[in-house]
Image: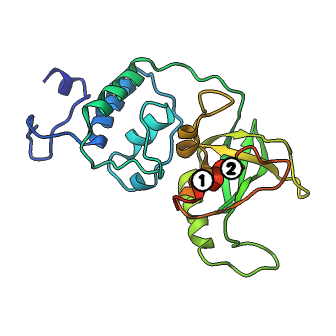
């Protein structure tokens, strides 16, 4: 009753709590989210899991992922309705208790619009730039001399639904711009813990990788921007 009064725990629509019922991963994530949000401990950045885009707990799950409190599966999904294990619950509590500031130098930006699956327009300190996500290609939809390619509209829609209006963090490889003046970047939906993110952070937070894992892009790397080339090949196998 104390937790209900604080808004951390909620019951079902029929007015019951069902205390003996097992708890799902999404339900437990929501408890942690409610507790941390109440204390103002969460950063507003969010991660991306393909299987929670229409789930009732989307905001809680994605925000905790963006704050490195929970992790998904190797295939880029979270499996929100699966019952949580004691080990998973303990890990989530530990990560929440030890939440610490991130330390990296990726450039913060806000997505103004989406051109197609792999190209976006962002605002950096009030100045607009076009960003081409690197290491991968999505099918063409707006090329001046090519027809719309299969699955191009789907890739564009996926990027629009996940990035439009969002705060993102831009990671440079070696090149700064291409011949069209577009910034060449890895686009992160949350600020990683360091300048050398781990594989789990890349799977859940780097949108270039998310596009590959969800089958909306193919690997396409060009020297000298090959920092994640080998990993991208491995991640594309999950598509």
Say whether marks 1 and 2 touch (CB < 8 Å).
Answer: yes
Q: What separation in Å lies between label 1 and label 2 (alpha carbons)?
A: 7 Å
In the image, farthest residue toward the right: 179
* Residue found at x 55% / y 38%: 201
Asked if one can make out residue 177 in the rendered structure from this viewpoint, the answer is yes
90, 188: nearer the viewer? 90
Disc number placed over residue 234 in the picture, else none = 1
The residue under the point 67% across, 31% down is: 196
Tell me: 154 left or right of 196. Answer: left
| Above-or-below relation of 217 to 225 | below
Kindly identify which numbered label has been placed on residue 155.
none
Q: Is residue 201 left or right of residue 7?
A: right
The answer to whether any part of residue 164 appears in the image is no
Q: Assign a secondary structure to mark 1.
A: helix
Image spot of residue 106 (x, y percent)? 71, 33
Q: Residue at x 15, y 38 (%)?
A: 11
**Badge 1, how many Cα within 10 Å: few under 14, some, many 20+?**
few
Task: Indicate the quadrant where residue 19 lies.
Answer: top left
Residue 144 lies, in percent from the top left, at: 81, 76
Q: Which residue is mark 2?
A: 230
Q: Quadrant of residue 24?
A: top left
Label 2 secondary element: helix
């Amino acid at each position: 009753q104390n937790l209900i009064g604080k808004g951390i725990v909620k019951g079902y629509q029929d007015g019951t709590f069902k205390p003996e019922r097992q708890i799902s991963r999404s339900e437990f994530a929501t408890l942690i989210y409610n507790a941390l949000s109440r204390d103002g401990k969460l950063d507003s950045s969010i991660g991306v899991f393909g299987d929670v885009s229409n789930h009732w707990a989307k905001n809680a799950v994605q925000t905790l992922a963006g704050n490195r409190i929970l992790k998904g599966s190797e295939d880029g999904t979270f499996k929100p309705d699966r019952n949580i294990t004691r080990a998973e619950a303990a890990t989530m509590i530990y990560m929440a208790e030890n939440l610490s500031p991130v330390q990296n130098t990726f450039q913060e930006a806000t997505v103004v619009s989406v051109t197609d699956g792999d190209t976006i327009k962002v605002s950096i300190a009030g100045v607009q730039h076009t960003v081409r996500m690197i290491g991968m290609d999505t099918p063409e939809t707006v090329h001046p001399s090519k027809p719309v390619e299969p699955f191009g509209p789907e890739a564009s829609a996926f990027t629009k639904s996940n990035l439009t209006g969002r705060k993102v963090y831009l990671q440079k490889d070696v090149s700064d711009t291409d011949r069209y003046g577009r910034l060449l970047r890895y686009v992160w939906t949350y600020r990683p813990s360091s300048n050398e993110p781990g594989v789990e952070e890349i799977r859940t937070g780097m949108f270039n990788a998310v596009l590959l894992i969800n089958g909306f892009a193919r690997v396409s790397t060009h020297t000298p921007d090959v920092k994640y080339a080998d990993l991208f090949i491995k991640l594309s196998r999950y598509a």
